[in-house]
Image (tube, grey):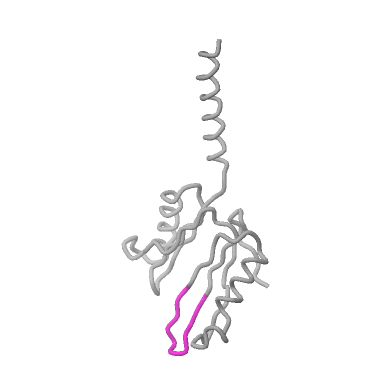
Amino acid sequence: MFRHAIPALIFACSSALAANAQDGPAGIAIVEAPEMGGGVCFADNLDKAFACAREQCKAEAGEAGDCYRVRWCYPSGWSADLFVQNQEGFHSHDYLCGWNDRDALEAAIAIKCDRERYPYLMECAAVRMWDNEGNSVAIE
């Protein structure tokens, strides 16, 4: 009797785990073409997410080869895109991801943009934010 129950139990457990993996959290993939464009996508695995982000980037930059993988975070959690510029005028984007809630993300942004801590910064601000489900949220 137990010989038949064990395979059935293993099958039931593996099916439940597979279903949960599909319904699990999403990751965030960020791709940039310096000075030309970028892409941000959310998906359950990095290959899907980066393919999507590269297509977005290609639409802005014109060539997929100009679009570089910048960040993957799984689960995405609360995430932000920061515009950062130093006193010499060099600017870039920095990305924070994986934070549990908005308050934690905003605290991380405050530290990353703290001019006492980083006196070489001329500008540092969040330009985009996403909640833990991948929805764009307003920046206050």
Measured as percent of width and height from the top left, residue 12 is found at: 55, 25
> How many numbered badges does the structure rendering display?
0
Q: Which residue is drawn at 42% across and 83% down?
A: 90
Q: Residue at x 56, y 79 (%)?
A: 113
Measured as percent of width and height from the top left, residue 35 is found at: 40, 74
Q: Residue at x 51, y 54 (%)?
A: 74
Q: Name the image quarter holding the C terminus.
A: bottom right
From which residue to which does the magenta span run?
83-93
Measured as percent of width and height from the top left, residue 22 is found at: 53, 40
Name the image quarter holding residue 129. Answer: bottom right
Q: Name the image quarter holding the N terminus.
A: top right
* Residue at the farthest front position: 2
* Residue at the farthest top position: 1
Measured as percent of width and height from the top left, residue 19 is found at: 55, 35
Q: Which SS does the magenta portion mostly show? A: strand
For residue 135, above or below residue 127: above
* Residue at the farthest left position: 65
26 part of magenta stretch: no
Q: Nearer the viewer, residue 87 or 49?
A: 87
For residue 135, above or below residue 33: above
Q: Residue at x 64, y 66 (%)?
A: 104
